[in-house]
Every structure is written in C-alpha cells, then in structure tokens.
Image (spheres, helix red, strand yellow):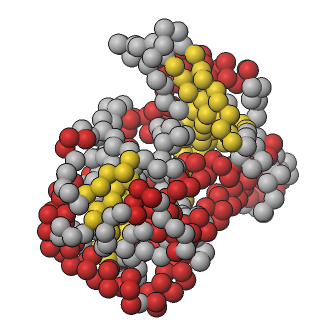
Amino acid sequence: MSMSVLSSFDLLCFSHLRWDFVYQRPQHLMSRFAAEQRVFFIEEPIFDAQHASLDVTWRQKNVWQVRPHLPVDETGVMTEVMLRRLLEDLLRDYQIQRYLSWYYTPMAMGFTNQLTPQLTIYDCMDELSAFRGAPPQLLARESDLFAHADLVFTGGRSLFEAKAKRHPRVYAFPSSVDRSHFAKARTCAEPDDQKQLPHPRLGFFGVIDERMDLDLIAGVANECPDWQIVILGPVVKIDPKFLPHHPNIHYLGSRAYQDLPRYLAGWDVALLPFARDESTKFISPTKTPEYLAGGKPVVSTSIRDVVQPYGELNLVEIADNVPEFVEAVKRALTLAKNDSAWLARVDEFLANMSWDTTWADMALLIEQQLYLRRKPAPALNPVVSFQAQWGSAE
C-alpha cells in the first residue's frame, strides 16, 4: 500500500508505557508508522527535576522518545500547565506543523486540548480504568477523548464490544505477532542462564503485575515440584516479596525482545497464568500468538480473548484452578511430543497474522478518514437541492 499520504504527517503518540519498557503493541505499530514519517513517542512525566524540561532521544529510524521531567507538584494543579508548555516547545523546536495525534492514555487529554491535529486516533489497548492505581479522572478523560477522536482502535474483541457504542468508528485490531521472529524458537539454541534447568520447563514472559494469578503459579509449583517454572519480565505495581518463591520457580528478570525466542526455545509449555478479575476482563495477550509462533503448546486461564478463538479452536489449553491447570499442562506436554497435526493447525491459523498487516489495515482507515476530512463539499444546484428536500413543486 502506498504510504505517500501519511508520509506528509508527523505523529504525536501519547503513551502510558515507556518506549524502553516491554516491547509490545505501541512499539510494533509506532515502528511501522516511522517507516516514512517522524514519530514522537511522548511518555508520562518523571517528577525528578527542579525545572520542567524535555528529554528528547532518538531511538531508531524516525522514532523520538520524549520524556518530560518535572518538579514535584503536590497539588497537581501545575503539572498539566507545565506539560502543555513543554509540548508547545516540542512542536516549535522540531517544526512539527502537520501531524496526527495518537493516544494510548486518555490522561493526556488534560494537556493536549490546544493541539490542532489533522486526525485524532485512540488505540485502546487495555481497559486502564480497571488497573491498580488508575487515576480517578481517567474515565472522564476517556469520554473527552471519544468526543475528539476520528478513529478508535481496540486491542481485542472484548474491548471492541465494550467500546463500540461509544463512537461511530470503532475497529477491532486484536494482538498480532511477528511470526518470523518467534519462529526462531523452533530452531535456535537457548541461553546459558536457562540451560542448567531440568525438564519439563514451563515458561512465561511479560509484565509481572496484579494481573498475574500468583496463587495459581504457587499451587502448580507446589503440586509438581519436578516441573521448572521460568518467569521473565519486570515486576510492576506489586511488592516482589509477595511473589511465590519455590525451588522450582525461577525469576530471570527482564530480557530484550530480540532474546525472547531463545528462552522460548527451551520451554516445553508456555503459560498465560492470568487472574480472572476486572483487570483482565478485556485483555488480549500478545503472548498468545507469540508462544504459538514459537511452536510451543500454551496453557491459559479462561481469558475471554484467549478462549475465543484460541481455546475454541483447540490451539490453547484452558484451565483455571490448580488441579485443572496441572492436567492441562500434562496434556500440553504430550501434545508437544506427539501431535504434528496440532502444529500444522497453529501455522495455518497464524498464516494471515502479522503486525505489518495490522498496520496496513490501520493505515488504510487513517488515509480514508484524511480523505473524507479534506474532500471539499460539492457545490449544490439550488433547484436540485430544493427538490431533494421538499419534492417537486408540480
């Protein structure tokens, strides 16, 4: 698809996630936007400075990470005033004149109402209001964002159903996958810090936060002490001392996106041990197709966007309590050894999934909306117009 239309615009992306955090949906999409246009990835502020300033860092082709540093604002009154001024400085210093605004966090509406983008896009990848520590004004800001947005994308089918009636142009774009990247797990060697662990190995990579069912992990580890559970990722919003600690649970810390296939290569089963509560009601884990692209059987709790379609197609085992989860892992271990037909069905399902396809479909919708906004209204013949509204005078 031609990128000539979008290449004439810069992109301002307002994100609650940091660019150098876990590599996921924002990074996949913004990297593709940046193929022909500048992307300014604007993060939430860090309150560590005496005077307000912006740290603007080039990260890769056409991607600039923008990190505000602010003084502590006990009342919260001045924070958005300072952010508004810093944003105006950014537009001036980098000569950003024709641009699109892209939101991951509705909270950014508090300091962006002075902007005049050609289009406003809301990519709703999570129900942030259900997360621990969500700001009390988030729902009101989201309503404001819906009122300003030209397009709304959702990170999964369940989110689409929750948001579809709030805007006339809502489109579902479930989590996709870089198949060739994770397919390396089928052939590559695993890293040294995992080699010494005995098999069978169960693994998880991603953010370790309140959405994880820690009791489930502890229960499986206790029930099956010969199974080694490998967990990769940062611990966020929970005290590490509350993590389950068993001899067969191994926390290896955060790993770079490019290294994940090597760890996945050494696992026998991949896990999605999410809690079932408000914080996970609308999630669509990117890990599901990533694990499958690596050729690994997957066991997940009954997260709706995993059950539909992966569980219903028998591509992923679904279980919620410890006894059921243990039995599901046992089935998955057998599957990994004996069922080549399962892997063929996985590959068939994933064949048409890619972040390139997701971005191309999004870009087409954006281009169409730009065309509709810029298309001049046709001049009306007064007689035709009168007759169309009132009918013939005869």
Q: Is residue 193 left or right of residue 109?
A: left
Q: Residue at x 51, y 19 (%)?
A: 69
**Residue 131 sits above or below residue 46 on the image:** below
**As drawn, 206 above or below 158:** above
Q: Position of residue 7 (x, y in %)?
A: 79, 46
Q: Looking at the image, which residue is at 34% across and 41% down?
A: 236
- Quadrant assignment for the N terminus: bottom right
Give whichever of 111, 323 is nearer the camera: 323
Q: Is residue 323 above or below residue 275?
A: below
Whether residue 70 sits left or right of residue 56 in the image: it is left
Residue at horizontal 48 percent and vertical 8 percent from the top: 50
Q: Is residue 188 visible?
A: yes
Q: Position of residue 340 (x, y in %)?
A: 46, 89
137 or 298: nearer the eye? 298
Q: Position of residue 119 (x, y in %)?
A: 66, 42
Left or right of residue 376: residue 87: left
Which quadrant of the figure has residue 60? top right
Q: How many marks?
A: 0
Depth order, front residue of 4/346: 346
Quarter holding the C terminus is bottom right
Is residue 373 something one can see in this rendering? no
The residue lying at 27 percent from left, 65 percent from top is 228
Spot occupied by residue 126 in the image (x, y as percentages of width and height): 42, 50
Determine the residue located farthest toward the top in the rendered image. 50
Q: Image quadrant of residue 267? A: bottom left
- Which quadrant would residue 176 be assigned to in this image? bottom right
